[in-house]
Each structure stands twice: as structure tokens, then as C-alpha cells.
Image: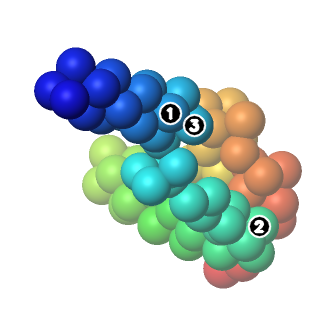
Amino acid sequence: MMPRAVFFLLAATVAVSASGCMFWKKKNKPAKPSYAVSELETSFKARWIEKRAADLVASGTNAAEATRMATEEFDGKFAYTKAAGAKHAD
């Protein structure tokens, strides 16, 4: 009787584990909406340009030129973002 119980227990264990762990399977999370990503990138761009322009002004560059230079630097450093090609809203 004991070997038969061990056999069934072993068979049940193999059947459950061979099913792909259906009880512990991760649920697919929905991707972040693209508008949230672009909003975040745009916000990052504005803050980065503001900070960099302030640094340039502190070093003696006039404000308009500092903003232009900071925008060019951002577009060069972060060209992989969607915000890099977008116009900066002052």
C-alpha cells in the first residue's frame, strides 16, 4: 500500500510541476501609456535646460544664449528621447 501512495504522490507532484507553474505565473502588466512617458521626458527636458542655462548664466553667458546652448546640449546628450526633437516651451 505504501509504494502505491508514494507513486501517486510523486505522479501528482510531476503533473503539477510540468504544467508550467500555473499557480505562480506572473500576470502581464500593461505597458505605460506613451503620453505618460512623453510627459515625463518633456518635464525632464524643461528642468534640465533650466538648470543648465542657470549654470551658464552664472558663468557669464547672457540668458538667451544660455538657453539656446542648453537646448543644443540636451538634444545632443539625450537624442534617444522623444523630447530631444521637440520644441522647448519657455
**Residue at the disc numbered 3:** 19
| Amino acid beneath label 2 | Ser
Instruction: Give the residue type at disc 1.
Output: Ala
Place of residue 56 in the rendered image (x, y in percent of width and height, measured from the top left): 41, 49
Name the element at disc 1.
helix
**Looking at the picture, how far across and down is residue 26, in whole percent?**
50, 53
Q: Distance between the residues labelled 3 and 2?
A: 35 Å
Residue name at image x 42 percent, y 27 percent: 11
Q: Foreground residue, 32 or 45? A: 32
**Are the residues at dot 3 and dot 1 in contact (C-beta closer than 8 Å)?**
yes
Q: In which quarter of the image is residue 8?
A: top left
First in sequence, mark 3 or 2: give its number: 3
Residue type at mark 3: give it: Ser
Residue 72 visible here? no
Q: Disc 1 marks which residue?
A: 15
- Give the camera-side residue of 24 and 76: 24
| Residue at the spot 53% in from the left edge and 49% down from the top edge | 22
Which residue position holds label 2?
A: 34
Q: Nearer the viewer, residue 61 or 73?
A: 73
